[in-house]
Image (cartoon, helix red, strand yellow):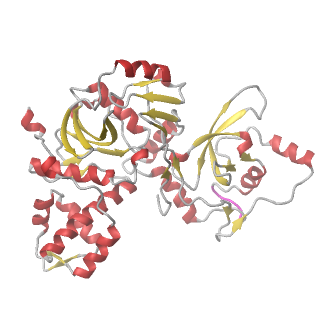
Amino acid sequence: MGSLEPPTTSENGSAHPAGMGKSQFTDGGGATVHPPDTVPDPDALKRRRSSVLPLEVGTRVLCRWRDGKFHPVKVIERRKVHAVGPSDYEYYVHYTEFNRRLDEWVKLEQLDLDSVEAVVDEKVEEKGASGLKMTRHQKRKIDETHVEGHEELDAASLREHEEFTKVKNIATIELGRYEIETWYFSPFPPEYNDCLKLYFCEFCLNFMKRKEQLQRHMRKCDLKHPPGDEIYRSGTLSMFEVDGKKNKVYGQNLCYLAKLFLDHKTLYYDVDLFLFYILCECDDRGCHMVGYFSKEKHSEESYNLACILTLPPYQRKGYGKFLIAFSYELSKKEGKVGTPERPLSDLGLLSYRGYWTRVLLDILKKHKGNISIKELSDMTAIKAEDILTTLQTLELIQYRKGQHVICADPKVLDRHLKAAGRGGLEVDVSKLIWTPYKEQS
């Protein structure tokens, strides 16, 4: 998503944009263009505002966000709320500076209607006169927020995906002790189309429309952890392996849940082919899911991870790095090299690059560079191609006389390790009790 900062997460799991200051439109040279300070005749102003209502889909306007400041948005959809007047609409808007996860329904009073005419007159979206025209860099940053994670789609398929998923259908969910604002559309069954909030059982992942239904369900549900085998326990952390074939409803519910927070995820209705690894924090009330990854039971491409998610309330605690490390520990147990399923989102690639960098450079430091790509792959279960691209990105490998030569200056390695950041939670391999799937068959 270019240089945009990812959203931070509040205590209740809500996503908020980091570094949001006061927003204005900018001209082609980057100069700030403020909405006009002068207030025209009240009657003329009222007539002008009425003339632009209802706003058309595609309109660009300034919108007051929950921080009390105005930010540029694009109208994605609109809906009538009460009567028949032009002002009786709500608008679903995309904040053009930020990721789609912040898209939301807003009321008319949150929109600065004075900015509509200016934006429309200047035709910011495409041609634009010099006053409010976006630079190529700004346009590219906005476009990147829409194509993130969809590199495998052609233009027609991307448009179809965007049209189908453009409006979030579920605004919030309740999961355990958290109420979490959702980020993206998820194709729940049609009977849930009128629900803005869903209530999930945090153990079996069944979802309901009303709080009373969840309370009744919790009195009957005898699960206190994900269905499946506990394969890892270290302190308060547990990992459960869930077979999609044996626990089909759980697997499908997990996919519905995950899609609310993953824009690029393909929803698999046929979960029989997958194993799900559910990471939990455990206390006296049970084992509470914090995140998961899935993998195919049999992958011809050596994929050891299909999908990965840390739930918003638990992000920035090292769990994502832990899940990546855990997927490679399973690959080592299988005696195989592994790689994540492509395409990776930009943030996914950053996470993996950080993991690969830390693991490989730690080994290079110990061996003082006297080690081959194949030996690195055998030791780490990281695919040779991933090792090669990581070292090339770090400019730690050269091609001499028909072979790759690793450069391992200790100072350079230390600098790259520092830039890669902390490694997160460690996987204690001695606590992993697991038999690869093929041996269970």
Report x, y in % for residue 235: 24, 47
Q: Find the residue positioned furthest to the left.
A: 439
Query: 349 or 433, which is in the foreground?
Result: 433
* Observer able to see residue 268: yes
Dominant secondary structure (helix, strand or loop) of the stretch shown in magenta: loop
Q: Nearer the viewer, residue 374 or 323?
A: 323
Q: Position of residue 307 (x, y in %)?
A: 31, 44
Residue 423: quadrant of the picture: bottom left
Q: Is residue 343 visible?
A: no
Q: Which span is picked out in magenta?
A: 126-130
**Image side of residue 121 versus residue 21, left or right:** right
**Quarter of the picture holding the C terminus:** top left
115 on left or right of 318? right
Q: Position of residue 39 (x, y in %)?
A: 87, 55
Q: Is residue 420 left or right of residue 240?
A: right
- Where 33 sits versus 48, above or below? below
- Residue drawn where x is 50% and y is 60% of the image: 4
* Residue that lies at the very extreme toward the front in this rendered image: 284
Residue 389 in the image: x percent, y percent? 25, 66
Does 213 appear above or below 285? Answer: above
Identify the residue shown where x is 67% and y is 60%: 25
Q: Quadrant of residue 371?
A: bottom left
**Residue drawn 64% across the image and 69% down it:** 30
Total residue callouts = 0
Q: Is residue 403 magenta?
A: no
Q: Is residue 82 left or right of residue 408?
A: right
Q: For this rendering, which residue is in front, 51 or 191?
A: 191
Is residue 127 within the magenta segment? yes
